[in-house]
């Protein structure tokens, strides 16, 4: 019979005791009379193959970096150390040594953000700077409008937070420039028709 602290009644959550089991996989909870069935996960019954290191037989054989008495059976995919069967760890589809696994766990920790692109400043700059040479606004105005729309839900600066008013201002200036170009093109085409 399978019992243990992790096995509890599915209805009342009380610990299942040995007398509650009818067979190895079924039983009835005494206090709430709920019938239950236990289906073990297949991996629980599978015997894991333990890694057995091979002893070094000749002086010419390569040895494990961590165990000089064990023959090297693999090469670490990260650092290139020779490792025995005990030290060769399957990690992310590659065989690596214990030090590289520890290093990967440490480097997987979240790191501090040191810089971030600020779309509010970029959109405002692209909208305002070409006003000095107004023909460039034909290209930069749609770009500034796109930056303002794209940057709306992006995080702001690390230091001062998001400044959406700058995105709104850049969008308004870009729309005004686009409107000016449309008015200029319409006026030019109507003058050409006359």
Image (tube, rainbow, N blue to C red):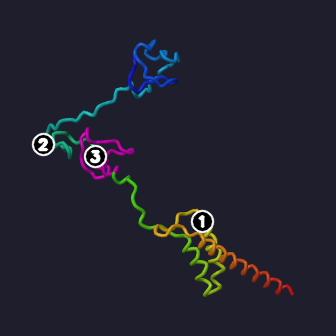
Give the CA distance from mark 1 to mark 3: 45 Å
Which of discs 2 and 1 lies nearer the camera? The answer is 1
Q: Which residues are magenta?
A: 77-105
Write down the residue under mark 1. 152
Q: Is residue 90 found inside the magenta-colored segment of the image?
A: yes
Write down the residue under mark 3. 97
Which of discs 1 and 3 lies nearer the camera? The answer is 1
Q: In the figure, is residue 100 to the left or right of 59? A: right
Q: Is residue 28 above or below residue 115?
A: above
Q: Residue at x 56, y 71 (%)?
A: 120
Q: Is residue 156 above or below residue 90?
A: below
Give the CA distance from mark 2 to mark 1: 67 Å
Which SS class for mark 1? loop
User: In the figure, residue 138 lies in which quadrant?
Assistant: bottom right
For the residue pair 189 and 160, the one nearer the viewer reads as 160
Residue 62, percent across and down? 19, 44
Labels 1 & 3 near each other (Cβ < 8 A): no
Q: Of the residues under marks 2 and 3, which one precedes in the sequence?
A: 2
What mark, if any, has residue 59 been given in the picture? 2
Give the mark count: 3
Which SS class for mark 2? loop
Q: In the figure, is residue 108 to the left or right of 99? A: right
């Amino acid at each position: 019979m399978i019992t243990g602290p992790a096995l509890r009644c599915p209805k009342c959550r009380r610990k299942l005791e040995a007398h509650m089991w009818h067979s190895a996989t079924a039983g009835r909870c005494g206090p709430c009379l709920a019938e239950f069935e236990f289906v073990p996960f297949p991996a629980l019954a599978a015997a894991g193959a333990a890694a057995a290191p091979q002893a070094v037989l000749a002086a010419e054989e390569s040895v494990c970096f961590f165990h000089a008495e064990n023959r090297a059976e693999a090469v670490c995919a990260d650092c290139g150390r020779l490792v025995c069967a005990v030290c060769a760890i399957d990690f992310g589809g590659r065989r690596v040594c214990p030090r590289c696994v520890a290093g990967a766990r440490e480097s997987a920790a979240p790191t501090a953000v040191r810089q971030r692109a600020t779309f509010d400043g970029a959109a405002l700059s692209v909208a305002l700077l070409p006003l000095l040479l107004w023909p460039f606004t034909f290209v930069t105005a749609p770009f500034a409008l796109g930056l303002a729309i794209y940057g709306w839900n992006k995080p702001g600066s690390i230091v001062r937070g998001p400044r959406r008013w700058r995105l709104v201002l850049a969008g308004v200036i870009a729309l005004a420039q686009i409107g000016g170009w449309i008015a200029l093109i319409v006026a030019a085409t109507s003058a050409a028709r006359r």
